[in-house]
Image (cartoon, grey):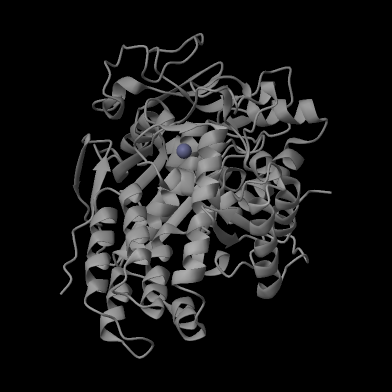
Amino acid sequence: MSTAKPLTLYNSLTREAAPFRPIDPDMVRLYSCGPTVYSAAHLGNLRAYVFTDTLRRTLNWKGYATTHVVNITDVGHLTSDADAGDDKMELAAQAAGETAWEVAARYTALFKADLKALNVLDPSIWSVATHHIQDMIAFARAIEKHGAAYEIAGGLYFDTSKVPDYGFLARAAPEGPEVGRIGEVQGKRQPHDFAIWRRSPPDERRQMEWQSPWGPGAPGWHLECSVMSMKYLGRRFDIHTGGIDHREIHHVNEIAQNQAFTCSADTGANWWMHNNFLVDRTGKMSKSKGGVATLGALVARGVHPLAYRLLCLSAHYRSELEFSLDAVSAALTRLKRLVGTVAKAAPADAAIDGWAAEQRFSRGAALDVFRDQSECELPPAAADHVDRFDAALADDLNTPVALTVLDAMLADRRLDARAKRRLLASFDAALGLDLLRTARADLSLRPETASLDAGAVEALLGNRQAARAAKDFAAADAARDRLGAAGVEIMDGDTVRWEWRPALTD
Ligand SMILES: [Zn+2]
């Protein structure tokens, strides 16, 4: 019988992996730093949400419910993450000739559409920074009252000498250049002190500014995440996620604020988890070179968005992931093969798919596969695959291994099609590749009408073979193109029905 592996997660605070234990045994409380909505999300940013979604789905697989908060930063993020320069929103609005509010609305909608295309689950709560200004002012006043903030001409600043182990998360000397580095501001006590509230310059009116005890201005970006995480998840919650670029400054400063607010050494979240960078050695992601920095640009090249998700899952989240068009193209080919394999080895089954739609897909539900055999009889071999899949996820979300378990399960001759379909439903609830739908070949963002029936496909394949045998390559290519236009691709001499086409924006 199956044995569950305890979930082990890497914690950036301790710099080691350890068994995960939530504060409340039934509900994991999770906060993820969201986007600054001044432009379309970069593919590297989107990697962070695929990682967070995988974490959340893994927690569900292990039987936990989750409360997940993701913020939308629509004010306060400056051109430098180190808290210097102008507000990104205001600059983007000037460049676009729009209001900052219009820019925020447009890119918030685009961000949510990107996540949907990547099959990322909606958070329990979207928290928008500008909806929480009064909460932020109250939080900042508390920090000031606790003696960890001081007012200068530029606004209210955090006094980093007032918290224990400032910069511990970043593991650098507090005086080192990496931690909390901030451009010089007149009147600051320590180089790493940062703005909690930025007062607007006396001769300037900003689009996004509010009255405060420190004059008209706007909250600092770091303050937003401290306030919104604690408001919805409590002073102590389980996990805080973000890109690894947040580990040295943003999260260091969030922790400092949390400690000053609670007058304790508590870091807020018990676990701080960071995904590594998407790296671009080819320059293909560079917008200035007309590259493919966004999901929309990839899709316009004919890449299914879930191929990007598969690319992310094919590397461990703590490893750098190298971006290139070859890597994306290989991921697309892998997705198509997977779709083809599912269509043949584990085709759609109304009873199982209906059952799947009703499950919450905890590991318990995966094991219900064995207890509830009303839909299909499962051989003992199924348990091996569930165990191996569970062990991969439990090992700090080892998705590259989980994907190989999926491949092995689909290829296992000991399992019939219905057993495979049932296991596929469970596994994919954790992987989020939407394989139950994609493999029905009806995942058309814009439906195409050029489908061929099976007889026509066979006839064209026959024509192609005959033309190749006669060395009439033009005719062979024509048959292949006709198949391609109907969404049937020839891969490794086999066919994969792939009817998806990118949605073209009008
Ligand atoms: Zn944040």
Residue 150, x across and y down, in percent: 43, 22
Residue 380, x across and y down, in percent: 21, 77
**Of 194 and 385, which appears nearest the observer?**
385
Q: Residue at x 32, y 43 (%)?
A: 268
Q: Which image quadrant for residue 356?
A: bottom left
**Of 148 and 109, which appears nearest the observer?**
109
Q: Residue at x 34, y 22 (%)?
A: 160
**Of 113 and 356, which appears nearest the observer?**
356
Q: Residue at x 28, y 27 (%)?
A: 163
Residue 427, x across and y down, in percent: 37, 65
Q: How many marks?
A: 0
**Image position of 412 with respect to 164: above or below:** below
Q: Determine whether, in the image, residue 308 is placed left or right of residue 392.
A: right
Task: Examine the rendering and report whether any part of residue 450 can be seen.
Answer: yes
Residue 363, x across and y down, in percent: 29, 69
Which quadrant: the N terminus?
bottom left
Q: Which image quadrant for residue 24?
A: bottom left
Q: Which image quadrant for residue 489?
A: bottom right
Q: Residue at x 73, y 36 (%)?
A: 100
Q: Determine whether, in the image, residue 304 is placed left or right of residue 398.
A: right
**Image position of 118 with respect to 146: above or below:** below
